[in-house]
Image: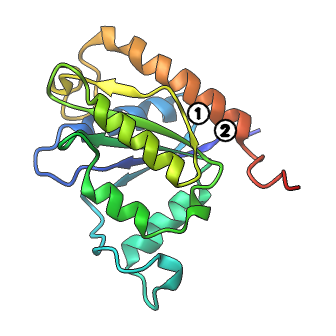
Amino acid sequence: MSKAQIAIISASTRKHRLSHRVSLHLKQHLSGIGYQTSLVDLNEFKIPLFEETIDKLDEPNDGLNEINKIISQADAIIFISPEYNGSYTSALKNLVDHYPKSVFHRKPIGAVSVTTGALGGMRCAMQLHDLSTALYGLTLPQALLVPQVHKKFDIDGTLIDETFIKNIELFLNDFLWLTDLTVGQRNSFTL
């Protein structure tokens, strides 16, 4: 049996962003243990401001179509966002608003919050949990908080603080357990 497909959403569009380092690391890590991963880098896709969900647009832009394919085929999703003013990026909110909830329904969604400060973005992680619930995803209670990201990962996503691997593994153990448990089960139950 092949392993699950996981979509990683890198939600920062800033120049010199640091949170993308975590996205690169998780993609490498998950691919290294046999999971099929797709990295959706919101800095590369020029997503228009939300006007209507993709299924109601006459001509959705190519980026929206490509991301729709990735998210629709994914068995699980990881949102990775820096904490901005106590929440996640507006680029992530703009992205998810373009898709109907059916794209996220019953899919495990993991929250990763990234900061240069000492706390790792707890408020962002809580907001990501609320977003996941609103999308009808299976909200993973465990979040990965990444404080002082510039001391944890280099520009290529290589872990430079080996002690942080414990945090990554705690998060991924629960995320992958839930993902593997639900693969193929999304539409198997109805009353």
Q: Residues within 10 Å of mark 1 (few under 14, many from 20)?
A: few
Name the kind of residue labelled 2 in the image. Answer: Lys
Comes first in the chain, label 1 or label 2: 2
Residue receiving disc 1: 34
Q: In this view, does 165 lie to the left or right of 12?
A: right
Instruction: Please state the horizontal and vertical placement of residue 152, each as a whole percent of the image.
Output: 23, 20
Q: In this view, does 24 lie to the left or right of 100?
A: left
77 and 125: which is toward the camera: 125
The quarter of the picture where the C terminus appears is bottom right
Residue 90 visible = yes
**Residue projecting furthest to the bottom:** 58
- Mark 1 touches mark 2? (CB < 8 Å): yes
Q: Quadrant of residue 33?
A: top right
Residue at 62%, 55% (x, y): give it: 105
178 and 138: which is toward the camera: 138
Residue receiving disc 2: 3
Name the kind of residue labelled 1 in the image. Answer: Gly
Instruction: Please state the horizontal and vertical placement of residue 150, each as a whole percent of the image.
Output: 15, 26
